[in-house]
Image (tube, rainbow, N blue to C red):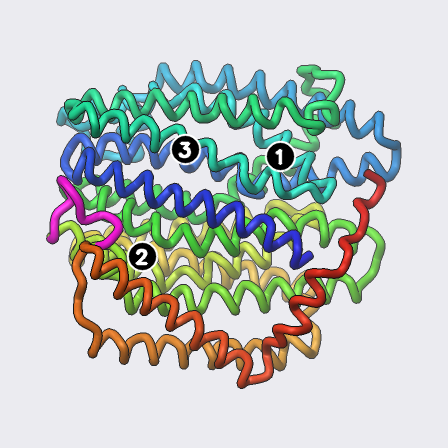
Amino acid sequence: MIRSFLTVSTGTLASRLLGFARDSLIAALLGTGAVADAFLAAFQLVNVVRRLLSEGALNAALVPAWLGIREREGEEAAAAFAGRVLGTISAALILASIVIALVMPLIITIIAPGFVGSDTRDLAVANARLMLPYLAFAGPVTVLMGLLNAQGRFALTAFSPLLFNIALIAAIAALLLGHADAVFAAWTLAATVGIAGLLQLLMLGSQRSARLATPLRVTFDKKMRGFFAKAIPGMIASSGPQWLMVAGAIIASATPSAVSWLYFANRLIELPLGIVGVAMGTVLVPELTRATGSGDRGAVAHAESRALELATGLALPATLGLIVLAEPIVRLLFEHGAFGAADTAASARALMALALGLPAHVLIKALSPAFFARGDTMAPLIATAKGFVVAVALAVVLGHVFGATGIAASIACGAWSSALSLLRKGADEFGFAVDDDARKRLPRIALAALAMGTLLWLTTAITPAGGHSLLGLIVLGLQITGGLVAYGLFLKLLGIASWREAVAALRRPAHQDRGA
């Protein structure tokens, strides 16, 4: 499980790093004015769709259903089921793209009410319509990724999202070199989003996964209706962080540049959330489905315990690091071209507030698979809805008083509301199987993270500010490296990590895919 987790995390890390390069170039190209707000509002809508369909979301329903049919009825029945899912989702999303294009002005008005009556709304509508072809490609891409994940083939699904960022970076580089007008540049980037989705589909469609979904059919029979009844709540629940950001953007749209500040701050939150959270959703669902289906409580406890340890061990130091180093990180990554020092300060404050919710987001990603593996996708959905309501209610008040920072804090509170709701629900229904090792390690992991954060904070008082120059890159790199080394030493001193055992475990031959 940990080997698969590392595979998915590495691919996600590579994709997120390319995403930072992409967003740094977007900041330099568009800045934080009306054109940038319009483009980013539309792009955020596409990102919700991406997370709604991909990054482990569809695993919530597809993987347990596909594995169950393969075990009961055989490979041919599983392939026929996958073919119906692939055909039906593809047809539904093509139709949805057409309908959404027609009502896009209404959608933009809902997600960005502050744009109403200005040219910004018209720009956002145009950008969003140009991005819509991505929606038609994202559905089949996600089904093919889910089939590969169900077989334990995580490498291709982990690295295929790189194509999305590579395509956008190439387009941005060309626009920067050509000194393109901002509006034309935004339209060109919006059109490139659909091309990026097509590239992913062509790559995955040429793999063995395509043969696992045959024959291709469009149907909405009883079995399909049952599948979508579970899939849709799970998909919405799995994209909880994006729904919370949408809630924040709705409130922030009334404040100039606030949508941009929140967007760039959230991009930094998505790095650790992607590395940990996406890997949790991708790897844990098939692992827990097999263990739950076999009735092996020991395997369930082991998977849930190791997942909770990994989530805590990676989320806590990331949270503290982002809070302590918020301003130098934002300055180094984004303060170029049209993105100025005032934008850096505002984005950094929003980042510090958003980081407080990172452990909650990761906790949700670690807890949700326990429900998904048991066929329950409604409990995570209800928890997500509660968090959304909390975030919106607080954002109305805190956003009015503290601006983008208050909205970011509201999003963090919404995440904690969802996490606590899910924790209570699981404890009441089936109890989370956390073993004795996890009970001993978790407090020590938290102590090691706190020690690292304290040490990192002390170093910032004696470290010269390097700005966004080469010196800034060196200084920030040394701080992050020092923090990681210190955290590793604290884990070792507290008896949590044994590097020799970890390396030996990773070198052991992987189990062959079950039944594949």
**Mark closer to the observer (3, 2):** 3
The residue positioned 69% from the left and 78% from the top of the image is 436
Q: Nearer the N terminus, badge 3 or badge 2?
A: 3
Please state the horizontal and vertical placement of residue 393, each as a whole percent of the image: 31, 52
- Say what amino acid the circle numbered 2 marks: Ser
Q: Which residues are magenta?
A: 332-341
Q: Label 3 neighbourhood size at 10 Å, few (<14), some (14-19), many (20+)? A: some
Magenta span includes 337: yes
When asked about the image quadrant of residue 49, the answer is top left
Look at mark 2 in the image and give the residue it sits on. Answer: 410
Helix, strand or loop at disc 2?
Answer: helix
Single out the residue that lies furthest toward the right.
Answer: 73
- Amino acid type at circle 3 is Ile
Identified at 43% across, 14% down, the residue is: 98
Q: Quadrant of the N terminus?
A: bottom right
Q: Disc 1 on helix, strand or loop?
A: helix
The picture quadrant where one finds residue 260 is top left
Residue that mark 3 sits on = 166
User: Which residue is the site of mark 1?
Assistant: 145
The verdict on residue 14 being magenta is no
Distance of mark 1 from mark 2, alpha carbons?
33 Å
